[in-house]
């Protein structure tokens, strides 16, 4: 498998949506956070870029972020991970795994299968479990195994942190749902799932280093830097461009539309979405600006 020095798109997405911020250093005066504010005469919306796994020592978060949460009466997330029912777990089993008479080997090339089995052996991931997982789910599983060895834990993720504190005290709404996200990834054709898996795993042994690079930008609120990394990672790969549109660009438009509806109603909303959804020309921040809203980074 040819290696590449650029950050692959799935690796970046997995870092942004399945990894953690490192412990935050002292912040110089005037530095920005990965937090934006939008105001109308009747409403205020805070937009926080999320990372979904963290180390315990990453807390406490900046008072600027915590104060925005404290002022809010409603919390909006992509999906409420604290409210996963048996139906959703059944859906995940159905859409993330093959049946007993099928295997990932029947859905990817021989070269890809040889590569992923070698990586699984390196991680100590059993072959029977690998064979049952669909490519989109295997990409997340193996990346999570790589990250778990360094202490990243979903229990300390930003969305988990605020959802737990909001329970019973603030209204919680979903911009999407876990079922929607499962169906989106599982609905990618075999070729697109294979591409996603390959690009995720080809940089697996440098995933922690990539996480550190991205999280350094997150800590400083360097949205342009992360946007540049995402754009560079897509490159000229046409299949990856299609995947990116489906799992990023299209979702940005849908979530931005729902945020606009909240801006038309009274109240203070604290939005938590994956950090990659906020950056770039097609990110939620710019989409809101194009709708005429003044968006300020805090």
Image (spheres, rainbow, N blue to C red):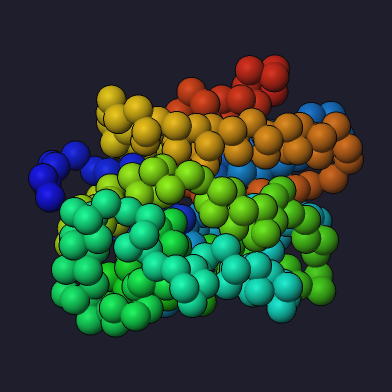
When asked about the image quadrant of residue 126, the answer is bottom left
Residue 120 against residue 27 in the figure, above or below: below
Tell whether 250 sits left or right of 59. right
Front-lying residue, 107 or 64: 107
When asked about the image quadrant of residue 226, the answer is top left
Point 53% across, 37% down: residue? 246
Residue 278 on image: x %, y %: 52, 38
Residue 135 against residue 153 in the figure, above or below: above
Tell whether 234 sits left or right of 76. left
Tell whether 263 sits left or right of 37. right
In this rendering, the count of numbered labels is 0
Quadrant containing the C terminus in the rendered view: top right
Point 49% across, 62% down: residue? 52
Residue 37 against residue 186 in the figure, above or below: above
Front-lying residue, 269 or 125: 125
Residue 275 against residue 119 in the figure, above or below: above
Point 11% across, 45% down: residue? 2
Residue 152 on image: x %, y %: 36, 73
Residue 114 on image: x %, y %: 18, 62
Front-lying residue, 279 or 38: 279
| Residue 135 appears in the picture as rendered | yes
Tell whether 96 sits left or right of 2. right
| Residue 68 appears in the picture as rendered | no
Residue 116 on image: x %, y %: 24, 63
Point 49% across, 77% down: residue? 100
Front-lying residue, 140 or 30: 140
């Amino acid at each position: 498998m040819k290696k590449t020095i650029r950050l692959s798109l799935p690796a970046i997405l997995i870092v942004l949506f399945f990894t953690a911020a490192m412990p935050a250093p002292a912040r110089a005066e005037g530095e920005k956070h990965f937090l934006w504010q939008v105001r109308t005469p009747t409403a205020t919306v805070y937009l926080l870029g999320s990372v979904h796994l963290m180390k315990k020592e990453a807390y406490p978060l900046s008072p600027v972020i915590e104060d925005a949460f404290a002022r809010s009466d409603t919390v909006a997330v992509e999906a409420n991970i604290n409210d996963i029912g048996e139906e959703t777990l059944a859906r995940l089993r159905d859409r993330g795994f093959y049946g007993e008479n099928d295997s990932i080997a029947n859905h990817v090339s021989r070269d890809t299968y040889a590569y992923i089995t070698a990586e699984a052996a390196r991680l100590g991931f059993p072959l029977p479990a690998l064979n049952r997982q669909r490519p989109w789910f295997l990409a997340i599983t193996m990346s999570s195994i790589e990250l778990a060895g360094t202490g990243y834990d979903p229990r300390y993720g930003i969305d988990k942190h605020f959802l737990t504190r909001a329970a019973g005290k603030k209204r919680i709404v979903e911009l999407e749902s876990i079922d929607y996200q499962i169906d989106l990834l599982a609905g990618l054709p075999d070729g697109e799932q294979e591409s996603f898996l390959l690009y995720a795993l080809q940089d697996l042994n440098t995933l922690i280093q990539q996480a550190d690079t991205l999280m350094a930008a997150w800590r400083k609120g360097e949205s342009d830097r992360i946007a540049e990394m995402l754009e560079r990672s897509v490159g000229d790969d046409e299949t990856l461009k299609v995947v990116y549109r489906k799992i990023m660009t299209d979702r940005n438009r849908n979530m931005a539309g729902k945020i606009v509806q909240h801006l038309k109603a009274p109240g203070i909303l604290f939005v938590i979405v994956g950090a990659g959804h906020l950056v770039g020309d097609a990110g939620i921040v710019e989409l809101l600006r194009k709708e005429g809203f003044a968006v300020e980074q805090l």
